[in-house]
Protein backbone atom coordinates (compact mmCIF):
# COMPACT_ATOMS: atom_id res chain seq x y z
CA UNK A 1 0.00 0.00 0.00
CA UNK A 2 1.24 3.50 -0.87
CA UNK A 3 -0.05 6.74 0.63
CA UNK A 4 1.09 10.04 -0.88
CA UNK A 5 1.22 13.27 1.12
CA UNK A 6 1.81 16.43 -0.89
CA UNK A 7 3.88 19.32 0.44
CA UNK A 8 0.77 21.52 0.50
CA UNK A 9 -1.06 18.98 2.69
CA UNK A 10 1.35 19.35 5.58
CA UNK A 11 0.14 21.05 8.74
CA UNK A 12 1.52 24.62 9.13
CA UNK A 13 3.21 25.43 12.41
CA UNK A 14 6.09 27.30 13.99
CA UNK A 15 6.02 31.01 14.69
CA UNK A 16 6.33 32.98 11.43
CA UNK A 17 6.48 36.31 13.30
CA UNK A 18 9.62 35.01 15.06
CA UNK A 19 11.17 33.76 11.82
CA UNK A 20 10.19 30.10 12.30
CA UNK A 21 8.13 28.32 9.64
CA UNK A 22 7.29 24.64 10.13
CA UNK A 23 5.41 22.09 8.07
CA UNK A 24 4.38 18.90 9.89
CA UNK A 25 3.81 15.59 8.11
CA UNK A 26 2.23 13.95 11.16
CA UNK A 27 0.10 15.18 14.05
CA UNK A 28 2.16 17.53 16.16
CA UNK A 29 1.23 19.78 19.07
CA UNK A 30 -2.10 21.50 18.34
CA UNK A 31 -2.29 19.88 14.89
CA UNK A 32 -4.08 16.68 15.87
CA UNK A 33 -5.34 14.04 13.46
CA UNK A 34 -6.15 10.67 15.06
CA UNK A 35 -5.57 8.95 11.70
CA UNK A 36 -2.11 10.50 11.30
CA UNK A 37 -0.34 10.00 14.63
CA UNK A 38 2.68 8.00 13.44
CA UNK A 39 3.98 5.77 10.68
CA UNK A 40 6.04 2.82 11.79
CA UNK A 41 8.57 4.19 14.27
CA UNK A 42 8.23 7.69 12.80
CA UNK A 43 6.51 10.16 15.15
CA UNK A 44 7.33 13.38 13.31
CA UNK A 45 8.81 14.62 10.06
CA UNK A 46 9.03 18.39 10.24
CA UNK A 47 10.33 20.73 7.56
CA UNK A 48 11.84 23.70 9.39
CA UNK A 49 12.82 27.10 8.03
CA UNK A 50 14.56 29.51 10.38
CA UNK A 51 15.48 33.08 9.51
CA UNK A 52 18.92 34.34 10.61
CA UNK A 53 18.85 34.85 14.37
CA UNK A 54 15.72 32.73 14.88
CA UNK A 55 15.55 29.52 16.83
CA UNK A 56 13.98 27.29 19.42
CA UNK A 57 14.84 28.24 23.00
CA UNK A 58 15.78 25.53 25.49
CA UNK A 59 13.08 22.85 25.58
CA UNK A 60 12.86 19.23 26.80
CA UNK A 61 12.73 15.86 25.06
CA UNK A 62 12.54 12.33 26.41
CA UNK A 63 12.22 8.78 25.06
CA UNK A 64 12.67 9.95 21.46
CA UNK A 65 15.34 9.43 18.80
CA UNK A 66 15.74 12.79 17.02
CA UNK A 67 17.42 12.79 13.62
CA UNK A 68 18.06 16.07 11.78
CA UNK A 69 19.11 16.55 8.15
CA UNK A 70 20.37 20.02 7.25
CA UNK A 71 19.45 21.17 3.74
CA UNK A 72 20.67 24.80 3.71
CA UNK A 73 22.43 27.07 6.18
CA UNK A 74 23.88 26.17 9.58
CA UNK A 75 22.13 24.71 12.63
CA UNK A 76 23.62 25.50 16.04
CA UNK A 77 22.86 22.89 18.70
CA UNK A 78 23.58 22.85 22.43
CA UNK A 79 22.12 20.56 25.09
CA UNK A 80 22.17 20.01 28.83
CA UNK A 81 24.26 16.84 28.43
CA UNK A 82 27.16 19.04 27.35
CA UNK A 83 27.02 18.58 23.57
CA UNK A 84 27.43 21.56 21.25
CA UNK A 85 27.96 21.69 17.50
CA UNK A 86 27.22 23.43 14.23
CA UNK A 87 25.52 21.17 11.69
CA UNK A 88 25.82 21.99 7.97
CA UNK A 89 24.28 20.76 4.69
CA UNK A 90 24.90 17.07 4.14
CA UNK A 91 25.45 16.50 7.87
CA UNK A 92 23.21 14.25 9.94
CA UNK A 93 22.60 14.97 13.61
CA UNK A 94 21.25 12.32 16.00
CA UNK A 95 20.17 13.09 19.56
CA UNK A 96 18.95 10.17 21.66
CA UNK A 97 16.98 11.93 24.38
CA UNK A 98 16.64 8.76 26.52
CA UNK A 99 15.30 9.56 30.01
CA UNK A 100 15.39 13.30 29.35
CA UNK A 101 17.49 16.15 27.99
CA UNK A 102 16.97 19.81 27.14
CA UNK A 103 18.43 21.51 24.09
CA UNK A 104 18.57 24.71 22.06
CA UNK A 105 18.40 24.87 18.24
CA UNK A 106 19.21 28.12 16.50
CA UNK A 107 20.21 29.75 13.24
CA UNK A 108 23.21 31.81 14.29
CA UNK A 109 24.44 32.09 10.71
CA UNK A 110 23.89 34.89 8.17
CA UNK A 111 21.75 32.83 5.78
CA UNK A 112 18.32 31.18 6.08
CA UNK A 113 18.40 27.72 7.65
CA UNK A 114 16.40 24.81 6.22
CA UNK A 115 16.37 21.38 7.81
CA UNK A 116 14.24 18.25 8.12
CA UNK A 117 13.80 16.93 11.64
CA UNK A 118 12.47 13.43 12.24
CA UNK A 119 11.43 11.90 15.56
CA UNK A 120 11.33 8.13 16.04
CA UNK A 121 10.03 6.04 18.91
CA UNK A 122 12.67 3.86 20.57
CA UNK A 123 12.04 0.15 20.93
CA UNK A 124 12.94 0.43 24.61
CA UNK A 125 12.47 3.69 26.56
CA UNK A 126 15.07 5.12 28.91
CA UNK A 127 18.81 4.64 28.67
CA UNK A 128 21.55 7.25 28.49
CA UNK A 129 21.48 10.46 26.48
CA UNK A 130 23.76 10.27 23.43
CA UNK A 131 24.62 12.60 20.58
CA UNK A 132 26.54 12.48 17.33
CA UNK A 133 27.00 14.36 14.09
CA UNK A 134 27.91 12.45 10.93
CA UNK A 135 29.64 14.81 8.53
CA UNK A 136 28.86 14.54 4.80
CA UNK A 137 26.78 11.39 5.18
CA UNK A 138 26.96 9.29 2.03
CA UNK A 139 26.00 5.87 3.38
CA UNK A 140 23.07 4.41 5.24
CA UNK A 141 22.63 5.50 8.86
CA UNK A 142 21.64 2.66 11.14
CA UNK A 143 19.37 3.50 14.07
CA UNK A 144 18.96 0.18 15.92
CA UNK A 145 17.37 1.89 18.94
CA UNK A 146 14.28 2.44 16.76
CA UNK A 147 14.63 -0.59 14.48
CA UNK A 148 15.24 1.78 11.55
CA UNK A 149 17.74 2.67 8.84
CA UNK A 150 17.94 6.02 7.04
CA UNK A 151 19.23 6.13 3.47
CA UNK A 152 20.10 9.36 1.69
CA UNK A 153 19.56 8.86 -2.03
CA UNK A 154 21.23 11.38 -4.33
CA UNK A 155 20.16 10.55 -7.87
CA UNK A 156 20.99 12.14 -11.19
CA UNK A 157 18.13 12.68 -13.63
CA UNK A 158 17.19 9.34 -15.19
CA UNK A 159 18.86 7.25 -12.47
CA UNK A 160 16.87 4.87 -10.32
CA UNK A 161 17.21 2.78 -7.20
CA UNK A 162 15.09 0.06 -5.65
CA UNK A 163 13.50 0.89 -2.34
CA UNK A 164 14.40 -1.54 0.44
CA UNK A 165 11.97 -4.27 1.37
CA UNK A 166 10.67 -3.32 4.81
CA UNK A 167 7.56 -3.44 6.96
CA UNK A 168 7.36 0.35 6.67
CA UNK A 169 9.17 2.65 4.24
CA UNK A 170 8.92 6.45 4.37
CA UNK A 171 10.14 8.52 1.42
CA UNK A 172 10.66 12.28 1.75
CA UNK A 173 11.78 14.36 -1.24
CA UNK A 174 14.25 17.02 -0.15
CA UNK A 175 14.95 18.49 -3.57
CA UNK A 176 14.32 17.68 -7.21
CA UNK A 177 11.69 15.33 -8.61
CA UNK A 178 11.14 11.57 -8.56
CA UNK A 179 8.61 9.05 -9.80
CA UNK A 180 7.35 6.33 -7.47
CA UNK A 181 4.58 3.84 -8.19
CA UNK A 182 3.26 6.00 -11.02
CA UNK A 183 3.20 9.15 -8.87
CA UNK A 184 5.35 12.21 -9.54
CA UNK A 185 6.82 13.64 -6.32
CA UNK A 186 8.48 17.02 -5.81
CA UNK A 187 10.16 18.86 -2.92
CA UNK A 188 8.28 18.36 0.35
CA UNK A 189 6.19 15.49 -1.01
CA UNK A 190 6.30 12.19 0.85
CA UNK A 191 5.21 8.59 0.35
CA UNK A 192 4.37 6.01 3.00
CA UNK A 193 4.79 2.41 1.89
CA UNK A 194 3.56 -0.62 3.81
CA UNK A 195 4.72 -4.12 2.85
CA UNK A 196 5.85 -3.03 -0.64
CA UNK A 197 8.71 -4.81 -2.39
CA UNK A 198 10.80 -4.28 -5.54
CA UNK A 199 9.52 -0.76 -6.11
CA UNK A 200 11.89 1.51 -8.09
CA UNK A 201 12.47 5.17 -7.26
CA UNK A 202 13.24 7.04 -10.49
CA UNK A 203 14.72 10.53 -10.57
CA UNK A 204 12.97 12.77 -13.11
CA UNK A 205 15.49 15.53 -12.30
CA UNK A 206 18.59 15.56 -10.12
CA UNK A 207 17.15 14.70 -6.71
CA UNK A 208 17.91 14.19 -3.04
CA UNK A 209 15.58 11.88 -1.12
CA UNK A 210 15.45 10.63 2.46
CA UNK A 211 14.29 7.02 2.78
CA UNK A 212 13.46 5.45 6.15
CA UNK A 213 13.36 1.65 6.31
CA UNK A 214 11.55 0.55 9.50
CA UNK A 215 10.70 -2.80 11.05
CA UNK A 216 7.37 -3.48 12.74
CA UNK A 217 7.69 -3.23 16.55
Image (cartoon, rainbow, N blue to C red):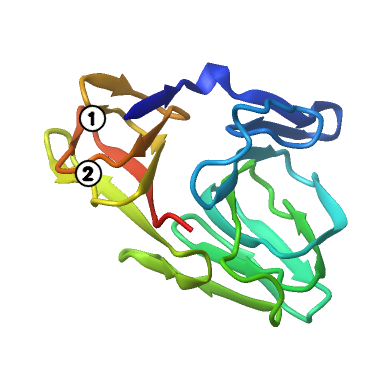
**Near-viewer residue (163 or 131):** 163
Residue with the most extreme front position: 217
Count up the numbered dots.
2
Q: Residue at x 69, y 80 (%)?
A: 127
32 up-or-down from 194: above or below? above
Q: In terms of secondary structure, where does tag 1 sit?
A: loop
Local packing at callout 1 (Cα closer than 10 Å; few below 14, some 14-19, many 20+) is some
Q: Residue at x 57, y 50 (%)?
A: 118
Q: Position of residue 73 (x, y in %)?
A: 58, 49
Q: Residues within 10 Å of mark 2 (few under 14, many from 20)?
A: many
Identify residue for label 2. Answer: 155
Answer whether residue 106 is visible to the viewer in this image: yes
Q: Nearer the viewer, residue 62 or 160?
A: 62
- Residue 204's quadrant in the figure? top left
- Circle 2 sits in a helix, a strand or a loop, which is it? strand
Whether 16 is drawn above or below 57: the answer is above
Q: Which residue is mark 1?
A: 205
Q: Tell me which numbered mark, 2 or 1, is placed earlier along the sequence.
A: 2
- Which residue: 59% across, 63% down? 87
Quadrant for residue 26, please give it: top right
- Is residue 210 at all visible to an observer of this figure? no
Residue 188 image point, x, y percent: 47, 29
Amino acid sequence: MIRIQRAGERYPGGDPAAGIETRHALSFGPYYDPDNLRFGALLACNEERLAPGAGFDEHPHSHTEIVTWVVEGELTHADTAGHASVVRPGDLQHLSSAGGVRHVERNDGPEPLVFVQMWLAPLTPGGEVSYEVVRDLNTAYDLPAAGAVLRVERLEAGASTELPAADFTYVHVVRGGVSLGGEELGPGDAARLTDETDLPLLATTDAEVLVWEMAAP
